[in-house]
Image: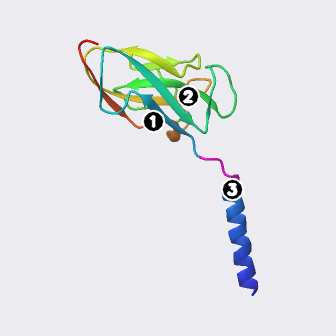
């Protein structure tokens, strides 16, 4: 009887812990979709669940700002995301933008970084989205 009571208490504690646990954050690109064919100027819309957006330089727990990585692998967690043509920063807290790329095939990733442009976690790096940019709109 004592073992059953201890097991019941353990299950109740696990259930309470699960109910209090926050859902994992998720980042993704709402647009363009994977394998999309787009013109040289196209819309990018960021998606984010269970986390919030704040401009760069604003240090609030549970927030970050978006970056788009073009044809490059994401830096390690805690590393600063470079600012160059392959690492586009949206430090104003933007949730959408327009990109212009030359015709070709590209792999895009969205990455959420903290107030110092550091990668927050692996969960806040999107799956790759492959697109083809055609020569005209």
- In the picture, measured across the screen, residue 66 lies left or right of residue 86, that is right
The quarter of the rendered structure image containing the C terminus is top left
Q: Nearer the viewer, residue 38 or 87?
A: 38
Residue under the point 76% across and 85% down = 2
Q: Could you tell whether 126 is left or right of 51 in the image?
A: left
Q: Residues within 10 Å of mark 3 (few under 14, many from 20)?
A: few
Residue 23: percent from the left, percent from the top? 61, 47
Residues at marks 1 and 2 touching, judged by CB atoms closer than 8 Å: no
Q: CA distance from mark 3 to mark 1?
A: 26 Å
Residue 19 in the image, given as x and y percentages of width and height: 68, 56
Q: Nearer the viewer, mark 1 or mark 2?
A: 1
| Local secondary structure at mark 3 | helix
Q: Circle 1 sits in a helix, a strand or a loop, which is it? A: loop
- Residue 115: name its quadrant: top right
Q: Which residue in the protein does label 3 denote? A: 19
Question: Where does label 2 land, which residue?
Answer: 113
Would residue 14 appear left or right of 87 to someone viewing this image?
right
Write down the region rendered in magenta.
19-23
User: In the displayed structure, would residue 127 be above or below residue 101?
Assistant: below
Going from the N terminus, do you reach mark 1 or mark 2 first? 2
Please give the count of numbered marks on the rendered protein.
Answer: 3
Up the image or down, 118 lies above or below 124; here it is: above
């Amino acid at each position: 009887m004592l073992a059953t009571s201890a097991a019941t208490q353990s299950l109740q504690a696990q259930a309470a812990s699960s109910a209090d646990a926050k859902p994992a954050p998720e980042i993704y690109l709402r647009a363009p979709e994977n394998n999309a064919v787009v013109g040289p100027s196209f819309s990018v819309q960021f998606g984010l669940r269970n986390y919030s957006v704040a401009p760069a330089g604003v240090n609030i727990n549970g927030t970050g700002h978006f970056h788009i990585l073009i044809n490059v692998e994401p830096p390690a967690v805690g590393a600063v995301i470079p600012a160059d043509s392959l690492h586009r920063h949206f430090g104003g807290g933007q949730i959408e933008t327009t990109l212009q790329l030359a015709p070709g095939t590209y792999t895009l990733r969205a990455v959420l970084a903290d107030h110092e442009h550091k990668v927050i976690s692996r969960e806040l790096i999107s799956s790759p989205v492959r697109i083809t940019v055609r020569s005209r709109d």
